[in-house]
Amino acid sequence: MKLIFKIASAPEWDEAVRSGAYRGSPDDLRDGFIHFSTAEQVTGTAAKHFAGRSDLVLIAVEAEALGADLKWEPSRGGALFPHLYAVLPTSAALWVEALAVDSTGRHILPSAMRA
């Protein structure tokens, strides 16, 4: 099972849970797809796009469960990133954990990722 990860603001995710579907962040909506990262990419994504933010959650999803709406496309330096061209049913989340920051402003990966 290949897990992919979405970093989202906690309020956005809370709203998605209430409605049953995550439609994406303002950046996702602008770009026309929901940005995901692999386990190897998530630290870089957090540092580049969410530095110092403490209102975040990390959402784990099984890539295969998203079907043909998930595309692997080149981004930073040609690396392939998972992009979802559909809404994300909140029921697809395997787990959701707060993404804490340390005293230097770097994000601390949840224990579920370090296991």
Image (spheres, rainbow, N blue to C red):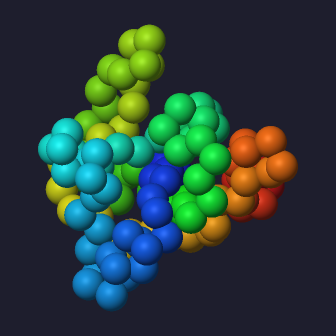
Q: Where does the C terminus fall, quadrant-wise? A: bottom right
- Left of 58 or right of it: where is 109? right
Q: Position of residue 30 (x, y in %)?
A: 18, 44
Q: Residue at x 64, y 47 (%)?
A: 52
**Would residue 88 be visible to someone looking at this image?**
yes
- Left of 75 or right of it: where is 53? right
- Left of 73 or right of it: where is 77? right
Residue 32 against residue 26 in the figure, above or below? above
Q: Residue at x 73, y 45 (%)?
A: 105
Q: What residue occupies the far right of the structure in this picture?
A: 103
Res. 75 image quadrant: top left
Residue 39 against residue 100 in the figure, above or below? above
Choose between 103 and 37: the one closer to the eye: 103
How many tags in the picture?
0
Residue 69 against residue 59 in the figure, above or below? above
Q: What residue occupies the far top of the structure in this picture?
A: 77
Choose between 113 and 32: the one closer to the eye: 32
Q: What residue occupies the far bottom of the structure in this picture?
A: 18
Q: Position of residue 26 (x, y in %)?
A: 27, 53
Q: Position of residue 86 (x, y in %)?
A: 18, 56
Q: Position of residue 32 (x, y in %)?
A: 16, 44
Res. 25 image quadrant: bottom left
**Would residue 1 be visible to someone looking at this image?**
no
Q: Residue at x 19, y 51 (%)?
A: 29
